[in-house]
Every structure is written in structure tokens, then in C-alpha cells.
Amino acid sequence: MDTIERIKALSDAFGPSGFEDDVAVLVREELDGYETFTDHMTNVRCEKEPGSDKPNVMLDAHMDEVGAIIQAIKPNGTLRFLPLGGWSAVSFPSSAFKIRSREGKDIPAVVAIKPPHFMKKEERNTLPPVSDMVMDIGVTSAEEARELGIGIGSPAVPDITCRYDEERGLFFGKAFDDRIGVACAIEALKRLQEEELPCNLQASFSVQEEVGERGVRSNAEALKPAVMICFEGCPADDTFSEDYMIQAGIGRGPMLRHMDVSMITNWRFQKLALDVAREKGIPVQESVRSGGGTNGAMVNQNYGVPAIVIGVPVRYIHSSNCFCRLDDYENAVKLAVELCRVLDAQTVSKL
């Protein structure tokens, strides 16, 4: 499929942490020119030249999205749930979700909110904790919910269909953290598939990043990268920050982060990426983050591998409704492709 349809399909795919199967199927279909391997966690990986003596350069993007999992069914059929990944409680009330049944059917749900007609005065200006929230699937009993195949452990994701505004090059949908990164990695692999490279190009499509960067460890253990390029959908700050503090505005290019709470980026690799971007005329943004964490940090800490994070800015990340732009995606791909063309053994040895 073409780029636009691929990004839309990835955004729409059902894949909260621990339930990434549908996304893995899409990834494998799009990489039909590569021999892919899927492990029992549902991580997907591949290599361009396995067994080569060239340095291994691993592209990584995580397939999971923030979602929820059903914890219990109340007698009236409403559903207690726990978040999968880092949600803010304010994002939940009245949000539409779909819950996957045992038979694989998606059941529409809404995070229930009491109508103002029934609220006490003090309730109107307070937010209940997530532990007091429920999802409603329109049934009247626990038995009816079970008959629909919904029960303890049923996964859920926001119920929204991705749309693309061609005039503005703008996507509106869910799960761009990190499906836009998955799309970047797929496109980079496609562009470099027939090209002779100074490195062995590898790809890691990992699971369960949102609950502790779990899947990428298995991919790194198997692929043994010398360096890592981590694609991320990163939180855009251009609607919240003063102008001088904006470091991830949409339409300004991908973000290269010098630091977040999980990793101080290898300055030599970061400088190489910034130098390549300037040389090739690729717009980029630089950031120093007081929060956040990525798969790059997991591989950097556990394997001593220099890693950079190429982030595509996404507005309203970790919520049901997000924006990102095609030009930021395209420039992220361009930067990764150009880096793979210069990461030879001598360059990698100096990082």
C-alpha cells in the first residue's frame, strides 16, 4: 500500500501493550521483501545481510499503543479497567473505546460519565480516580457482557478512525506513538532494500514499550546491534510552551533529543545525526526533555550500544485523539536513510 494508506492502517490497527498481533501482521505484509522473524512476545525483526561482517545498525519502533485492560465486571454489566501505559485520568471520561472479545470482535464502549443532571454540586468540578471509572458497552448485566465475550483480561483501545487532510498533510487519529515510527522504519527499509550499504541494516518492531520497554530487549539480544536508531512518536509541545521553549513543534522536522529521564544521548552519535541533517538540508529540532523514556535507553543501558532517538512530533500523545504531519514523517525517514549510508565500521568505531 502507499504511504498514506500505510500510516492510516497502522494508526487504526488494534494493538495495546501485550496485544500487538494485528500490527505485527501489517508489518510483515509490508516487509514482504525481507525475511522476518516473529518471536513468542510478537516482536518482529529482520536483517538485510545476516552474517555480514559489517556493523549492525538497528532501526527500532514499538508496535504497541496505550490502551486499557478489563479488570472486573460489575453486576450491572459495566466494566472496571486498568490503563495499559501512561494515561492521564482526564483523558478517559466520555472517551470512546473498543474492547476486543474472546472471539476477536470489537465491541464499542464508552468511559461512563454521570450526566450533570445527577451530579452533586461537588462532583461537577472534580475528577474521579481511574479506579472509580468504568466502561459501558450498553448491557444491563454481567451475564450479558460475558455473552458478548467480554471478561477479565479483555483489551481495549480508543475507538477512532484515522483521517488524512491532503491539503495540509495532516493525520488525525490514534496510536501515532509509535505507529508513525513503525511507518518510518518500514519506509526506510523499503528505500534501502536494494542499496549497497556500509552496514548491515536491521529492524526491530518491538512490543510492550508503553509498559516498560520490554520487547526491545529480546530483539536487541537476537540482533546484537552496534548502533541503534530509535523512531518515536514524541509529544509535541508547540501548543503548551512559550516560543523559546518549543522543541517538538509539528511541521518543523523530527526531534533529536539530547536527554530525557532515561538516557543522555551519546553526543558523538547525536552530533553525527545533526551534521548529516545540516549537510542534506533536512530540518530537525533538538530537545532536552525533563520526562519521557524510549527503547533507545533500554538498549543503551543494557548493551552499551550508542543510540539516537528520531522523534516525529505528535500533538496530544497518550490520548485518544492525536495530530501528526506527513512532512515530519518524511524528514525522519530521510535522516535515518542518510545515516545508514554513512555508518561504516570506521564511523561506528568512533561513536
Image: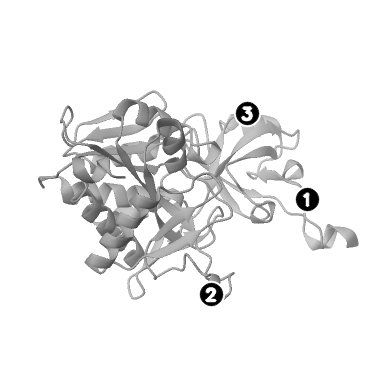
Identify the element where label 1 is drawn.
loop
User: Closer to us: mark 1 or mark 3?
Assistant: 1
Q: Quadrant of the C terminus?
A: top left
User: Which mark identifies residue 152?
Assistant: 3
Q: CA distance from mark 2 to mark 1?
A: 35 Å
The earlier-in-sequence mark between 1 and 3 is 1
Give, as a three-letter code, the residue at label 2. Answer: Tyr
Q: Can residue 10 be seen in this snapshot?
A: no
Q: Can residue 31 be seen in this snapshot?
A: yes
Give, as a three-letter code, the residue at label 3. Answer: Ile
Give, as a three-letter code, the residue at label 1. Answer: Pro
Tell me residue 346's x, y (percent).
20, 43
The earlier-in-sequence mark between 2 and 1 is 1
Tell me residue 194's x, y (percent).
10, 46
Which residue is at a point 77% across and 59% down the rendered structure image? 115
**In the rendered structure, are the residues bearing label 1 and label 3 in contact, judged by CB atoms less than 8 Å apart?**
no
Which residue is at the front of the view, 275 or 35?
275
| Residue under pointer 2 | 244
Which residue is at a point 76% across and 33% down the rendered structure image? 75
Residue 198 in which image quadrant: top left
Q: CA distance from mark 1 to mark 3?
A: 22 Å
**In the rendered image, the vertical position of residue 351 relative to residue 36, given as above or below:** below
Q: Specify the farthest residue to the top.
A: 40
**In the rendered structure, are the residues bearing label 2 and label 1 in contact, judged by CB atoms less than 8 Å apart?**
no
Q: CA distance from mark 3 to mark 2?
A: 47 Å
Identify the element where label 3 is drawn.
loop
